[in-house]
Amino acid sequence: MMRVGLAMLQGARHEHEEAILSIAKDLQHEVEVVQLRKGDQLDASIHGLILPGGESTTMRIAARSEGLLDAIYNWMNDHPNRPVLGTCAGAILLSAPSNERAPYINVQISRNAWGRQRQSFEADIEVELERLNSSGVSVPRTPDVFGHTPLVVGDAENQNSGDAFPGVFIRAPRFESDGIGCEVIARLGEEIVGVRDGSKCAVTFHPELTNDRRFHAWLLNEIAALSPTD
C-alpha cells in the first residue's frame, strides 16, 4: 500500500486526491491518500508528498500553528529520495522554503509573476513525461467531512488527443531560470514552467485541474521505484 501525504493547506487539494486515486486505478497501485493538517501526521509511513497550490504566504501562516510546514521540511530532509510534487504555490515552498532552509529545488522563482487573478489563463504546454491513457475521473465524487466535493474537470472523452498538456495557470509564479542541476520537464513556448531536481518536481500550473494525470502518475511511479531503505 502506497501512502501519499497531501498537505491540506490551500488550493485544489481534493482535486489532487481525486487525480491520485484515479490514476492509481489505471496503474493498478493500491494507494491511501493521507490528508495532512497537523505536523504529527507526517512520519516515515508516508511514501510521497503533494504540496498543492494556493497563496504561498497564507499557506505558511496557516501551517505554522499546527507545525505542518516544518514537519514537511523535516520529512523531506529525513527522506531525500522520496518524491514530492509541488504545484503553483507548492513550487514556491520547494524553491524558496522558509526559516533559512536550503531550497529543495535549486531554481529561483517569483510569486504571482504572471499577474493578478484576471490574468489567469489556459494554454497547451510541452511536457517531458510519458502521456498515459487514463480513464479520467473514476472515483466516487462524494463530499468529505467538511462538505467539499472535488471540482468537475472533464472526462476521458474530452482529453487532448495529442501530446500537449493542458496547462492551467492561476496567479502563477514564474521560474527565473532553469536552475542549477535541474531537469526542465515542462515549457510554455520558450518559458520554463516545470522542473525536476532528483525526487522533487515543481510546476507553476495546476495539473490537478485537468484529466491528464502524467504528473500524478510520475509521483506514484517514483514511489514504486523506491528501495526498501529509502
Image: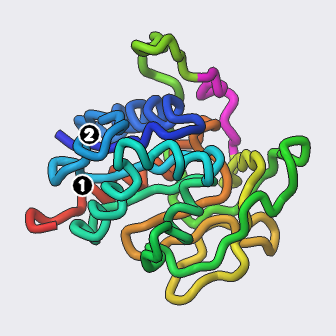
Three-letter amino acid code of the residue under disc 2: His
Q: Quadrant of residue 163?
A: bottom right
Q: Disc 2 on helix, strand or loop?
A: loop
Question: Which label was assigned to residue 97?
Answer: none
Residue extending furthest left? Answer: 228
Give the residue at mark 2: 29
Contact between labelled residues 1 and 2, with CB atoms less than 8 Å apart: yes
Three-letter amino acid code of the residue under disc 1: Ala
| Mark 2 or mark 1, earlier in chain | 2
Q: Main secondary structure of the magenta part?
A: loop
Q: Is residue 61 left or right of residue 70?
A: right
Residue 180 in percent (x, y) is at 55, 89
Residue at image x 19%, y 50%? 43
Residue 100 in percent (x, y) is at 46, 76
Residue at image x 66%, y 25%? 154
Closer-to-camera residue (229/78): 78
Whether residue 197 is visible, yes or no, is no
User: From which residue to which does the magenta span run?
Assistant: 151-161
Q: Quadrant of residue 190?
A: bottom right
